[in-house]
Every structure is written in C-alpha cells, then in structure tokens.
Image: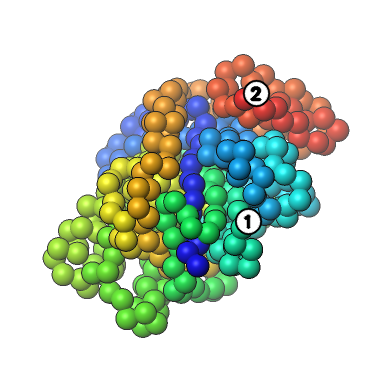
Amino acid sequence: MKIGIDKIGFHIPDYYVDMNDLAVARDVEPAKFTIGIGQDAMAVAPISQDPVTLAANAALNILDEADREAIDFVMFGTETGIDHSKSAGVYVHRLLDLQPNARTIEMKQACYGGTAALQLAKGHIALNPESKVLVLASDIARYGLNTAGEVTQGAGAVAMVISANPKIITIENDSTFLTSDIMDFWRPTYSDVAYVDGKYSNEQYLSFVSQVWNKYKEETSLSLDDFEAICFHLPYTKMGIKALETLLEEGNEETKQRLQNNLEVSIQYSREVGNIYTASLYLGLISLLEGKELNAGERLGLFSYGSGAVGEFFTGVVQENYRDHLNVDHHKALFANRKKLSIEEYEEVFSATLPTDGSTVTLDTTDDSSAICLTGITEHMRQYANNN
Ligand code: HMG
C-alpha cells in the first residue's frame, strides 16, 4: 500500500526581522548573518500566537470536510509545549472541529518530533487504510536577545495529512535512524530559552548526517544518483548547505549539480522564516515542492535531526500532478503580507511574555491577521478564538 503526505501547508506569524537590521544592531558584519548563517529574515511571533495557534492556522488552510470526518489521529510534534500534561493537539482538535472519535497526543524529541509523528502516522495508516492522520509540527525558537543563537530564531508550523494513496509524496519503507545521549542543545523545564553548545551541535548534526546516510546506503544499495533532491532539517540554511557538502564527496558531477540546485530551492522559505524546530525539515520540503516542477516518480531524501539527539534519513517519492494539491498562492500571500519590525519593536515583542503566576490576562488581537489567536489566560487556562 502507498502511504504518505496527502496534503501539506504551513503558517507563519505576521512579523519578521530583517537580518541586515539585526546585524547592524548587534554590531556584526551583515554578511555573517546573510551568508555565513544564510538567513535573510526571521519570523517573530506576537504574544497572541503560540504553538497551538500556529499549528491550527497551518491546518486550517489544508483541511476540507472529508478530512475532518476521516482524521482519527492527531499527532502534535513540538518542543515548545504549553503544558506538562495536556497535549497541544487537543486544543487544535477542537479549534478545527475534527470529529470526536480520534486519538490526540503530543510528541517530543527536539526537532525530531514532527518526523516521529509522521512515521507513526504511516504505521497507523498501514493498519487502518481508510483513516487519515493529522500531523502537526509547530515551534517558536527562542535563544534570547544578544545571544549567538539569536540569528537562528524563528516561529511557525507545518500541518500534514497522512493517508493511503497520497496526492503529494509517498513515504518509502527504507529509513535509517540513530539515537545518542548528548547535550548539544536542550531546554530545561524552568527555562524560557534554549541552552546550546553551538559548535558542538553543528558537529553532531553533521556526524549524524554521515552516520544515517552510510547506514542507508549499506541497507538499500542506493546511491546519491538515485535522488532528485535531499531536504535537510534547517536550523539555519547554511547548515543544510554544509550537510549536503559532506555527502557530495561521492556522486557524479551531474548528481552534485542537481542536488546543489535543488537544495537552493528547498532553503528559500527557511531563509525568510528561520528555525521552526520540528517543522523546519517540512518547510524545506514545501519550499522544494512549490519552487520546482518535480516529476512523478522522482525520489527525495529527507534528513531529520533533533538535538539530544535523534536523527533519521528517509525518503519520499513524488506523485503525479502533486502541484494541483499545494497551497502556493496562500503561502506567497503569507510572506507578502508580513510586517517588518524595527529592532526596537522586535525586542519589545520578544520581551512581552505571558504571566507565569496564574494571573488573568486578556490579549489584544486586533493587529493579528491569523484566523486563530490566543486571546488570553483565565484561571490558568489558555483561551483561544477561531475568527475564521
Ligand atoms: P557564531 O559563533 O555566532 O558564528 O554561532 P560563527 O563564528 O561560527 O560564524 C558562523 C559562520 O559565519 C561561519 O561560517 C563564519 O566563517 C561565517 P562556517 O565556518 O560555519 O562556514 N562568517 C562570515 N561569513 C561571511 N561574511 C562574514 C562572516 N563572518 C563570519 N563577514 C551558531 C553560529 C550557529 C553556532 C549559533 O548561531 C548557534 O549556536 N545557533 C543555535 C544552535 C544551532 O542552530 N545548531 C545547529 C545544529 S543543532 C540542530 O540543528 C538542532 C536544533 O534545531 C534544535 C533542536 O533539535 O531542537 C538547533
């Protein structure tokens, strides 16, 4: 049975910061951010957007009534959880008015959570071919003002419907993965920002790429020549470029050129959004699918990495007329309608956090164009509104 991604879409908040502005404000040569890191902009979430609303907004634009009836499993990958107990997916289930006889859970392993959900969804469909699974990957990456990681922040979500006979890509069965208990990046439960050993995290990411790719080659006898493109988890786009370089020690000239050209297409959206952790790999996939006319039957490689760390290399095969099922215009409009923040405005938005002492708060959402917003907190309960 063919199982894979039937629909896919993303959501980003209304605000962004230009990396040239950030560089000037931080007294850094702009080329370091735009070339050395490979980021042009980073998405900034207002206080009225949290991981729940970003994910719900992403899903809102891909689901129809038939999906709402068929979805019987919601899996929410995030490392920006809003509750130790209740799954962020349960809020989304209600906000999207999904049929009630569904399982809903949250998955966590840093940026790998979305891939874990996708692979488990595939297993669920293999056992229940008539059902559909909603996979959500949603995060707000925060390292703190004036930190080395600041330039690699971002905010956004990807939603995917996983089904049998998918319209976009099938996910193949061969896949190689790896777990190793390392401290390259983590966020203790008491901290609002991540702790990171930046250089070590880069080294580990690249080491995971080599290890899962070598194991994949051993197990499948496939080579780089069998791939039209490879998408990588993109903490910042230069990381994807470095990852591909480590693989390009093999492969013929034509393959190298093709993979480099297609990587360039796959990093375009991330250049404008920044790291969205669990959703970053899938934002790269959307950038490729929307930015290029791929042919049915072409194989795509996908490298997922979640610090701490788990990595996986897996593959998808492009389906006939896949472009008819994308949301290109909606995604273009999301970028076109964003408002650029000055650095002072960004710092203000970044510093405006929700109360943690249980006090009641009502948020002004008049400037938030997203259909689904966080409207406040009452008696420790987040309040959401769907203005769709
Ligand atoms: P840094 O120390 O500010 O930067 O930290 P740098 O000094 O290493 O410079 C970065 C690059 O800019 C270098 O290029 C410089 O040469 C270049 P490279 O040597 O790497 O090719 N550069 C310039 N280029 C052009 N013109 C110039 C110029 N000046 C310098 N004038 C770092 C960078 C990424 C470490 C930092 O931002 C950070 O710690 N970020 C967060 C951690 C991170 O993103 N790690 C990635 C791997 S781990 C991962 O992907 C998992 C993650 O997503 C979390 C999860 O799984 O949940 C993070």
> Extreme right residue here?
379
> What residue is pinned by disc 1?
131
Residue 246 found in image quarter: bottom left
| Picture layout, residue 48 above or below residue 282 | above
Q: Which disc, if any, is residue 387?
A: 2
Residue at the image position 72 percent from the left and 44 percent from the top: 99
Foreground of the two, 113 or 199:
113
Where disc 2 sits, the SS reads loop
| Kind of residue at badge 2 | Asn
Residue at the image position 54 percent from the left and 56 percent from the top: 163
- Which of pointers 2 and 1 indicates the residue nearer the eye? 1
Residue 249 appears left or right of 353: left
Residue 274 found in image quarter: top left
Determine contact: label 2, label 1, CB under 8 Å: no
Q: Earlier in the sequence, mark 2 or mark 1?
A: 1
The residue carrying pointer 1 sits among few (fewer than 14), some (14 to 19) or many (20 or more) residues within 10 Å by Cα, namely some
Of the 4 image quadrants, the one containing the C terminus is top right
Q: Which disc, if any, is residue 321?
A: none
| Kind of residue at badge 1 | Ser
